[in-house]
Amino acid sequence: MNEAINISSLTKSYGTHTVLKGLDFCVRQGEIFALLGINGAGKTTSLECIEGLRNYDSGSITINGIMGIQLQSASLPKYMKALEAVKLFAKWNKTSPDRAALEALGIYELAKKSYYQLSTGQKRRLHLALALTRNPDILFLDEPTAGLDVEGQISLHEQIRQLKAIGKTIILASHDMAEVEKLCDRIAILSGGKIAFIGTVEQLGEAMGKHYNITIQTENGAERYELENIGDSLLSLLMQYRAKGETVTDIQIDRGSLEQHFIKIAKGD
């Protein structure tokens, strides 16, 4: 598969503090890709370097296509109308507004509303419309559903899937692991300025090994266990409860969430 973005040996320091220590990864054309990392891991610096918002010290960044960027902290003048903003961005980029995209995002419904009158969800839709002004091949979305209610999240997730369906490459930055798991084809986890993992969510689960989270509920409450050999270990646990005369009322078993795996890798556990 062709690459939309290729990062090779990327380094970046602030004074004596090195944030990126030879970063290497690629984003494939047409995929939804998440770059994840705890605070201080270098995620924001990486994205800003790729987006051209920050200089880097060494290495290379290859971008194959036009980029569109939706920043989490984006804002517009208080009294600017939604459609005025779209026309302004279109003129600046020497293009015409995409009526189909604007209709899909519901921008015409907001046409006469000033920016300050828009809800958080409506602002997110407008910011996405502005990021799509140049008909980009590659779209950066920074916390696209932050502050949205469930209905707004579902709606925006569907719009992101539709963008992927027409061939857009999407780079997602999100702290919502459920969102990442639902949307992304692949993820990369940053730790200490380097890529600690890259692959699918399923591959991450396999890489973490057969760790099971067990919750055993009795009349006296619930207790949690982390086991590797679920067969023998679970049987042994149940025998212990039986020996204590405690009745087990419920057992829950899972292999760990994406969030749990992410934290373990990101912190180097």
Image (cartoon, rainbow, N blue to C red):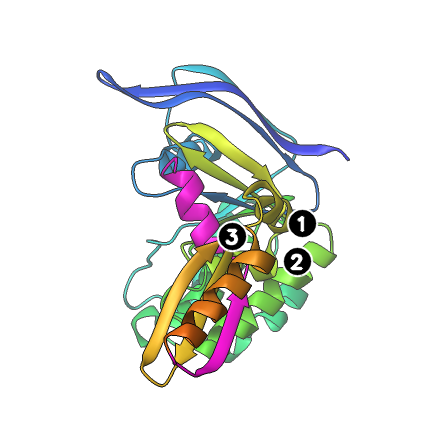
Which residue is most to the left?
Answer: 15
Q: Is residue 61 above or below residue 207?
A: above
- Would residue 242 appear left or right of 90 to someone viewing this image? left
Q: Which mark is residue 59?
A: none
Dividing the picture into quadrants, the one containing residue 215 is bottom left
Chain-order first, disc 3 or disc 1? 3
Which region shows up in magenta?
245-269
**Residue 213 visible (yes or no):** yes
Q: Is residue 133 above or below residue 4?
A: below
Q: Name the residue beneath numbered marker 3.
A: 131
Identify which residue is drawn at 46% across, 65% down: 237
Residue 161 belongs to magenta span? no
Q: Amino acid at mark 3?
A: Ala
Chain-order first, disc 3 or disc 2? 3
Q: Answer yes or no: do the residues labelled 1 and 2 have beta carbons within 8 Å?
A: yes
Name the element at disc 1. Answer: loop
Image quarter hosting the N terminus: top right
Distance Cα–Cα, label 3 vs label 2: 12 Å
Name the element at disc 2. Answer: helix
- Would residue 72 appear left or right of 258 to someone viewing this image? left
Q: Name the residue beneath numbered marker 1.
A: 168
Which residue is most to the front?
Answer: 243
Q: Name the residue beneath numbered marker 2.
A: 163
Q: Is residue 7 above or below residue 101?
A: above
Q: Nearer the viewer, residue 9 or 126?
A: 9
Dividing the picture into quadrants, the one containing residue 203 is top right
Q: Nearer the viewer, residue 19 or 120?
A: 19
